[in-house]
């Protein structure tokens, strides 16, 4: 009986820790990149401009790659290269379009990328 209670308590603590980490990371991203809400995820292409582009640019800078892209709200060549690199790191099609799958990895990226950054 005591073992069951200890096992249940341990499982509850592990679950709570995982949820707290996820919430903390999402909150940190929202504070770091405050241009739009994390639920505002329109498709972005080379002709896109505005706050959603700034959000994607900011998120791409948070998670790596050098040089960082300018957070200017214009989806130019540098932003496109960065998005293609991020897509490749995460096993997504290298389209350069920020679609729903790309937004997901911008908000929740892989820890490491072994793909060389484009020059």
Image: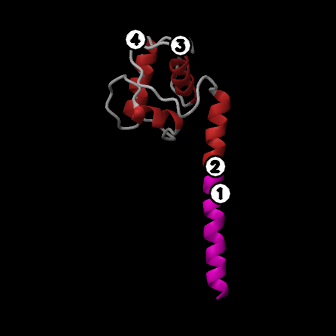
> Going from the N terminus, do you reach mark 2 or mark 4 first?
2
Region of the chain picked out in magenta, as a range: 1-20
Judged from the image, the secondary structure of the residue bearing numbered disc 1 is helix
- Is residue 65 at least partly visible in the picture? yes
For label 2, the residue is 21
Residue ID at (43%, 14%):
48
**Pointer 1 with pointer 2, Cβ within 8 A:** yes
Q: Nearer the viewer, mark 2 or mark 4?
A: 4
Residue ID at (62%, 26%):
33
Distance of label 2 from label 4 (alpha carbons)? 36 Å
Distance of label 4 from label 1 (alpha carbons)? 41 Å
Q: Is residue 7 magenta?
A: yes
For label 1, the residue is 17
**Pointer 3 with pointer 4, Cβ within 8 A:** no
> Going from the N terminus, do you reach mark 3 or mark 4 first?
4
Percent coordinates x, y for residue 107 in the rendering: 53, 36
Residue 8 falls in image quadrant: bottom right
- Per the rendering, the mark at residue 47 is 4
Judged from the image, the secondary structure of the residue bearing numbered disc 3 is loop
């Amino acid at each position: 009986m005591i073992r069951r209670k200890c096992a249940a308590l341990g499982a509850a603590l592990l679950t709570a820790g995982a949820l707290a980490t996820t919430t903390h990371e999402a909150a940190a991203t929202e504070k770091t990149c405050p241009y739009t809400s994390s639920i505002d995820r329109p498709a972005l292409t080379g002709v896109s401009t505005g706050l959603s582009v700034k959000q994607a640019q900011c998120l791409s800078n948070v998670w790596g790659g050098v040089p960082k892209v300018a957070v200017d709200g214009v989806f130019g060549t540098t932003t496109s290269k960065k998005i293609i690199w991020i897509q490749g790191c995460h096993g997504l099609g290298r389209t350069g379009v920020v679609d729903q799958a790309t937004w997901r990895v911008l908000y929740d990226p892989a820890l490491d990328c072994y793909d060389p950054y484009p020059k």
